[in-house]
Amino acid sequence: MMYCPENPLAKEQWERVWPFFNEKDYGFTMENYGHDGRTSKDGIGIGEFTIYDWGNGAAAEVYNRIRDKFGVEIFR
């Protein structure tokens, strides 16, 4: 669900819901997809906020755990 060019289908959904998103917003992800129990290919289910300990924070935590366990940098 991260808004970035590497996720073209998700990126398209984000831009349908939030047409002002651009490259400065890459890396954004919502706190939870489909919060109200509805989703669609047109972007229904994409919300308007994030909480660090869900989307963004969970991704950062996974990255740190992989780096700590394997001693490698994933992104260069």
Image (cartoon, grey):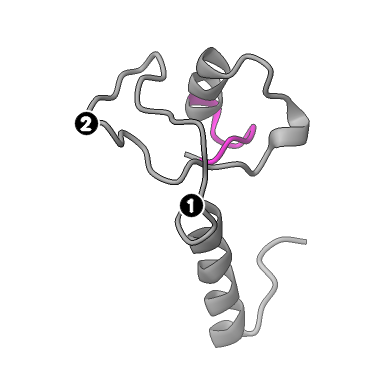
In the image, residue 5 lies in the stretch drawn in magenta: yes
Q: Which residue is drawn at 54% across and 41% down?
A: 2
Q: Residue at x 66, y 66 (%)?
A: 74
- Residue 11, above or below 30: above
- Residue 57, above or below 42: below
Residue 66 place in picture, x, y as percent: 54, 76
Nearest the camera: 58 or 74? 58
Nearest the camera: 17 or 4? 17
Instruction: Identify the residue at the far left of this view.
Output: 37
Q: Which image quarter: residue 46?
A: top left
Q: Dot 1 corresponds to which residue?
A: 55
- Residue 19, above or below 37: above
Residue 45 place in picture, x, y as percent: 35, 27
- The amino acid pointed to by label 1 is Gly
Q: What is the spatial separation of the Cα atoms under label 1 and label 2, in whole angstroms?
A: 18 Å
Quarter the C terminus occupies: bottom right
Q: Residue at x 67, y 23 (%)?
A: 21
- The amino acid pointed to by label 2 is Gly
Q: Dot 2 corresponds to which residue?
A: 37
Nearest the camera: 14 or 69? 14
Q: Is residue 75 left or right of residue 12?
A: right
Q: What stretch is highlighted in magenta?
A: 2-9
